[in-house]
Image (cartoon, coloured by chain):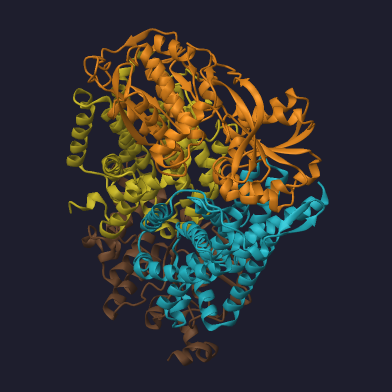
Chain colours: A cyan, B orange, C brown, D yellow
Amino acid sequence: MDFPGLAAQLLNGVQHGLLLFLISSGLTLIFGVMGVINLAHGSLFMLGAYLAFVVTGMGAPLWLALPAAMLGGALLGAVLERGLFRRFYTRDHLDQVLLTFALILLFEEARSLLLGNDFHSVPVPALLDFSIPVTEGFAYSAYRFAVLAVCILVAGLMFLGLERTRLGSAVRAAAEKPEMVQLLGLDARRIHLVVFALGTALAMLAGALAAPLLSVYPNMGDGFLIISFVVVVVGGVGSVAGAFWGALLIGLVDTLGKAYLPEVAGLSIYVLMAGVLLWRPAGLFARGA
Amino acid sequence: MTRNSFTPGVPRRALALPLAGIAAGALASPAIAQGAPLRLGLMLPFSGTFASLGENIAQAVELHLNERGGRMGGRPVQVIRLDDESNPANAVANVNRLLGRDRVEAVIGTVHSGVVMALVQASRERGVPLIIPNAGNAAATRELCAPTIFRTSFTNWQPAYGMGLALGRQGVKRAAWITWDYAAGNEAGEGFRDGLRASGGEVVRELKLPFPETNFQPLLAQIPGLNVEAVGSFFAGGGAVQFVREYAAAGLRDRVPLCGSGFLTEGTLAAQGAAAEGIRTALHYGDGLDTPKNRAFRSGFRERTNRDADVYAVQGYDAAQLLGIGLDATRGDPTAEQPLARAMRAARIDSPRGAFTLSPSHNPVQTIYLREARGGLNQVIGVAAEALADPGTGCRMA
Amino acid sequence: MNALEAEGLTRRFGGLTAVADVSLSLALGELHAVIGPNGAGKSTLVNLLAGELRPSAGRIRLGAEDITAWPVFRRARAGIGRSFQRTNLLREATVFENARLAAQAAVFAPRRWLRAAARDAEPIERAGLALDRVGLAARAALPAGSLSHGEMRLLEIAMALATRPAVLLLDEPLAGLGPEEGERVAALLRGLARDHAVLLVEHDMDVVFAVADVLTVMVDGRVLERGPPSAIRASAAVRDAYLGHAA
Amino acid sequence: MIVAGRRGHLLMALAAVAIACLPLVASNYHLQLASTALVAAIFALSLQLLVGAGGMVSLGHAAFFGIGAYAVHLLPPGLSVLLTLPAAAGLAGAAALLVGAMALRTRGFFFLMTTLAFGQMLFFVFHDTPLGGGKDGVFVTRPALELLGFVIDVPRRDRPAMLLWLNLGLLVAVYALLAALMGTLFGHALRGIRANEDRMRALGYDTGRIKLVAFVLAGALAGIAGHAQAMADAFVNPEMLAWHHGAEALLMILLGGLGALHGPILGAFAFVGLGEASTLITERQRLVEGLVILAVVLALPRGLAGLGR
């Protein structure tokens, strides 16, 4: 194993993991606070990516797409929460699963109607359209470094917000022990709205960020949905810190597996998940486990 | 051969149930009365990722039909389209629809190599003539070949073989191969290796990632350490766009030239932009083929659709030509299996790509061109392999 | 011989010690009540004995067997029946079905899994007896969710009884009952103690002092005092720590 | 979960007789369609054992269906169906044992995520490794239809009728098995777990073991459905294992009504019928499917079975 190659692979793994964190943190918060699994979370990622495609397609720079994805995501999340999810918190699991499954189908269909089914590439912003050599003979695109930076920034802001603000600590309390909300006399409806909007915004931001790296294509969210589930199971439900470390771990295992053990790479993260379930069924980073 | 039997190869007492009178004869042989329209099924993707391919194939089929006055073997042809969405999960159901509900007598289809398997099976079991206008999975004209199955496109092996051959002739001794880990990618990899070996080179490493992932970084990061003179690849569509761009962004383009099966740059050059400039690929068609047949075909297609023809349209056009030859020989009877197959097998197709014949396993024996991406076109710059046939390994016609 | 015996039971939650070094024994024919202010660790103690929680230290014996590491269901099968502080029923099933499920648990060995439930007379009979004993026989066909609060508490006890336990752990069976219903349950408790070893956690002091043979007073997770009702009533320490501000 | 009473069973027997008589009137195409619905019904019934009876919403159930189908590919060709069918059920059941042993360490939505992930893992095994024969799927040789030493050989044009009867027989058998199971002590315990697992444990039920047995049985029955599909198509492909396929079975359960054992059968026929009808109107299958689900979860939470009440 050559060392410079390993350095590049580690960089890949961290970058992949941080992107996973943006997606799975929303998933784990929504699940922790409301007890709902949103199967359409991957489709929101897909919507974010297509939003970046549309924005850049109109000639606007990509960095405009990022706030647009955040705002659009927050709005969409709020609408979904108010219009649909709110009625389903107390319903049977089966109903919730099928509701969000239906959303996947409808989001995909809307995407197909409005934007077609083609694979589209999204240009890297001109400012970042150059490569930085990281090892002898291998360069890393500046945009990938920018994605790394944005992910770290967002993760930092999230931790600050959760630790330092009143609303943040209420959300944290709600995610760890949903019954705390009532005990503390918090406004559950408001917390639900905020959490759902935030989770949706993060998923769409991740999509917009990833669009130049992955291109946009139908059903692109499906793979990310499942890998996010693995992150949440490994990290522990309801814990943002768990999602962070879980995402980094999965990103690294997945990337290094593909590079060095390609025959079994597809299975590596599932084997990891099985191991975690046997060893610590509540997740590696769950509190009180 | 075991088709048409519910119990293949079990040498016990057979008990034939007298069901014939009970089951309604849904598939009774069609009336071939002269003049009754021939129901031709076009099972193609008209929605989904490959919709534009399906549409071009269908348009080209109809273009040729028009040239023939809408008749084959003396019978008017009624075209029945069925959208398979390139969704293998629904493939069997869609084939049943086309053959059972719509009762088509011959099929041209399809693009997706998974969906085509259901058509291949139906053709083997029910004897319906099938012409494959795109899907390049080798099996259809190797171990699963059948007298009623023909192909007017390629096997994945063919273009990649041409590319490998051309690369070795340029003096490349060591090359890597990078692809999605699925049948098409692996069959192309086999062709690339065979071609390169035939001209004195060697594939030293195969890099693969699961289909259809686009996280190429873990693979690209390994290339500098391999000490190769060229990288061959098989990607198509959006994956090809992303791959070519990342290859350039990783700083590899100027150090290790990228080449591949023609689909790497087919229909994707606009999206790939400067990153694709200079990439060499091999395919059975290309831009700048200046033959009368090609000129006529392209202008006819443009007139009909307002679009430029592409390799898919050529394949569709030739599928219609081939079926026409077969039906002319049987005076419009698609159930005359033997004469139909004989006539099609012996045909010489005057294709826009250059004339071709069919191999014993019913796959084109064709010229593979070497092309270079220049200014948004896949300019033909030479011939990679002349009259190349797929090995047809494992094909035993019943 | 003591039916259930706990020795040095301790349970910590992070920095908090909910139960500290509690020893306790239950004997057949004896009703042992545990009292103490809110947060004294009574429910934690019940959960430790039933197996819902694992002790941080200490041992539990059922008869001659050490059951400290046994899971809930194994203890239940071995003869520990319990009722819950918060009513915990199969609300959509009928009263009878609730009791029958409890009775079936006792005969539910893998080789009998495929027995047709309708033909298994013994659990049906035992479910009927249990309902009779708590006085719910007339309500047998109603959905459990439609019972009054008091009746649900009685059903809780009936279910515990139907499993044919030697030991009964009853966590606040009178919680939320009116005086009349409370009297009914108190009478039932006295009867139960004749053929079971009963641990009773209860807030209603009048009932506790009326029915208990032995009382354990817990404060802050520790045993403060233990003895017959008369001795507890007379204890100055108990009065200071507990009865004082309860009164 | 309700098992239909005597009148319900009579109605279902009449329906079964009606389906058995279909070959007298329907075209082969419609016989194939009915067969599809029968196989879907077996699959949905097997999932109902988990969802309706045990309260375990699994999103990975299609994996066991797919393994049952792929068993036909993995076994040497030409074997009797009397061998391949139990083998398919056994393989699927064994896979369910492995997945269940892990996934059942979790509950509720956690369980759902874990089954989805493990199901997807099995999907990848058949999609990306040589074991499955590639993402495009593979042809299989149909197992020999052999009963009591006789090989039943039917001409191709009568095969749809034969398969229809075969699948009908399987469905009737699976339904009867589950109906009987619901009346056993095991069935009662399973229903108790769905209603209140904690309580059941406190009563002395080893709920983990009961759920695992149900999970394995459901997996084996899904394997039987998969085998039937492979038998009908003579073709297997990895999409059979995809989680969308499992979600469709959940939809059938919801369509038919969660509360009754016969619900999934109604649901499967409704699903296949709706799918077929919608192809006549629009190419956009996903739109139709999505809207149907929305309509059902918003307006008909008790499914079609709830309409009559």
Give the image location of residue C137, x and y in percent.
Answer: 24, 60
Task: Say above or below: B157 vs C102.
Answer: above
Question: Viewed as shown, does residue D198 lie left or right of A224?
Answer: left
Give the image location of residue B225, x and y in percent.
Answer: 80, 44
Residue at the image point whose x is 79% and y is 39% from the top: B228
Give the image location of residue B291, x and y in percent.
Answer: 54, 27
Q: Does the rendering let one see residue B213? A: no
Q: Nearer the viewer, residue A200 or B247?
A: B247
Tally of numbered tags: 0
Residue B162's image quarter?
top right
Task: Say above or below: B108 vs D194.
Answer: above
Residue at the image point whose x is 75% and y is 35% from the top: B175
Task: Say above or below: D169 vs C85.
Answer: above
Q: Does the rendering let one see residue D273? A: yes
Residue at the image point whose x is 23% and y is 32% from the top: D16
Q: Nearer the viewer, residue A218 or A278?
A: A218
Give the image location of residue B29, x and y in percent.
Answer: 28, 15
Question: Viewed as shown, does residue A11 lie left or right of B146?
Answer: right
